[in-house]
Image (cartoon, helix red, strand yellow):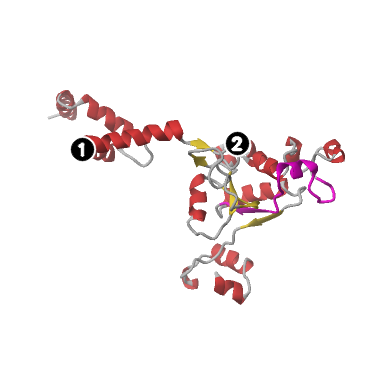
Amino acid sequence: MSSLFVFEIRHSQFEIAMQFTSESVETLVEQFSKLPTIGTKTARRLANYVLKMPREEVEAIADALMAVKEQVQRCSTCFVVADEDPCPICGSDKRDQSTICVVEESSDLLAIERTGEYRGVYHVLGGVISPLDGVGPDDLRVHELASRIDPSFDDTATNGDLDADADEAGTGASTNGEPTEAVEAQGGRVDEVILAVNPNVEGDTTAYYISQLLEPFDVEVTRIARGLPIGGDLEYADEATLSRALEGRGGVEDGDRS
């Protein structure tokens, strides 16, 4: 029996099987397959599970999916996904508005919030600088970050300079490090920007760019510590992690509190 003949038989069997398959189920499988990390087999298992679910639960899932698209928006201040603008964090008078923690995505914000240790506000970049992926500073919300520190921020600051005329007029970043009239009118100044980006090449590049961008402003730019995890073993740590841990070493009292 030739391989071509076997292929024709199997192809015919597949076409016959498809005639008895629900078109609605196949459509659902196709839609599930569009989700990340979901292959055809997994999508088919999900579809079969949906068929066994009560109608009320299926309607609840459908309503939740529609609510995400219709109600969820981005906070115009920090750009986190939320149901209201401003988000509960930016709109809270219990948060320290003088400290901004910069994260890559909204999921990173949630991770920091779960610690219960941070009481400042956030700024979501929407990614990191990655030339290989075609992502540059203009594709992120770095200019919006600078504008939160000083509303008179000009695009020329991306080259490390501010408009001299704006400085002399008192509407740009002050040359003596004092807050400008625009900052005072905003209702408060920012004292510290914490860079909470991932410790990789893209994260390091993004952190360096932001630090250079904010250099003309009178604001402290810090980055979260990197090193050995709690419960880690020195014997199994890689050289890069150990080097970072040595560079970021602190006092014994600081280490005990952490």
- Residue 13 is situated, as x and y percent measured from the top left of the image, at 14, 27
| Side of 76 where 187 appears, left or right | right
Q: Nearer the viewer, residue 242 or 98?
A: 98
In the image, residue 175 lies in the stretch drawn in magenta: yes
Over which residues does the magenta segment extend? Answer: 174-197
For marks 2 and 1, give the one nearer the viewer: 1
Asked if the magenta segment contains residue 89, the reply would be: no
The residue indicated by pointer 1 is: 54
**Image quadrant in which you'd find residue 137:** top right
CB under 8 Å between discs 2 and 1: no
Q: Secondary structure at mark 1?
A: loop
Graded by Cα atoms within 10 Å as few (under 14), some (14 to 19) or many (20 or more), the crowding at tag 1 reads few
Q: In the figure, residue 17 lies in which quadrant? A: top left
Label 2 sits on what residue type?
Asp
Query: Percent from the top left, x then y, of residue 243?
Result: 59, 66
Amino acid bearing label 1: Pro
Side (left or right) of 19 relative to 183: left
Residue 70 can be seen in this image: yes
Image-based side of 159 in relation to 46, left or right: right
Q: Residue at x 36, y 42 (%)?
A: 37
| 2 left or right of 132 in image | left
Task: Give the Cα separation between the discs numbered 2 and 1.
Answer: 44 Å
Callout 2: helix, strand or loop? helix
Residue closest to the far front? 93
State the image coordinates of residue 231 (x, y, percent, origin top left): 46, 70
> Relative to 203, is 9 above or below?
above
Q: Is residue 47 visible?
A: no
Q: Earlier in the sequence, mark 2 or mark 1?
A: 1
Q: Which residue is mark 2?
A: 139
Seen from the viewer's position, the closer of residues 220 and 8 is 220
How many marks on residues? 2
